[in-house]
Every structure is written in structure tokens, then in C-alpha cells.
Image (spheres, grey):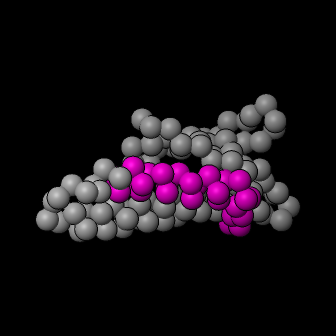
Amino acid sequence: MYKVEYKNKPEEKLKLFINSYKNIYLETFTDTWLFYEDLIRQNYINISEKFFNEIIDFIDDIFSQEKIYWYSVLENKNYQIKTKLWNFRIFVEYTENNIEKIRFIENIEFYKK
């Protein structure tokens, strides 16, 4: 099994993505005069935390496997996988050290389906 390590860039991108995802919904349900506005807002906060955890779990599960069969090689000689999670396509760029059995997550990008 491989060890998975995140570089600074993908970790920050993931946090920014989740914050923007959450804030879009929180701004939508601000000052609506709905009786359960606070409950709705808290629900979106919980959903965004769940989404963050699912992304991390998914990446850890995929990249800890011994073989990844569905990757592509980029121009910079890094590898990339493409996958779908919730309503997004996720592109994860990584490098690997086969001797020490470590995969480094170099970059992550999100696109709406």
C-alpha cells in the first residue's frame, strides 16, 4: 500500500473550493425570513463538511492502492486521474515514488458536471 501526502497547493484549493461551495448556499439563505433559516444554513454547513470528508476519503482510498489503472500522463510527466463525485468532475494530479511507496497529490481541480 502507498502512503498519500498532500502538497500545499491541492490542500488549499480543496479548502477554497469547499468554502465557496458552502458560501454560495449560505448567501442564498440569508435574510429570507424563513422560519427555519438557521436550520437550513446549518444543514448546508454539515453537507459541505461531509463533501470535504468524502473527497479526502476518496483520494486516500484510490491513491493508497497498489496499482492505479486509469491514469493519464501529463506533459510535465506527472500523472492525472479524472473522476466524478457528487455533481463535480475532479481532476487529481500526482507524482509517485515507487521505492518509498509514496504518492504526492500535486494539484486538484473541480469542474461542474
Residue shown at 55% from the left, 62% from the top: 56
Residue 78 in the figure: left or right of residue 18: right
Out of 50 and 93, give the one closest to the viewer: 50
Q: The N terminus lies in which quarter of the figure?
A: bottom right
- Residue at 62% x, 52% y: name it: 13
**Residue 9: within the magenta?**
yes
For the residue pair 103 and 69, the one nearer the viewer reads as: 103
The quadrant holding residue 22 is bottom left
Along the line of sight, the residue nearer the viewer: 26 or 97: 26
The magenta span reads: 1-26
Residue at 25% of width from left, 57% of height from top?
31
User: At 67% from the left edge and 36% from the top edge, which residue is drawn?
Assistant: 72
Q: Is residue 3 magenta?
A: yes
Q: What percent of the width, then of the height, locates residue 40?
A: 24, 63
Outermost residue toward the right? Answer: 99
Q: Quarter of the image containing the C terminus?
A: top left
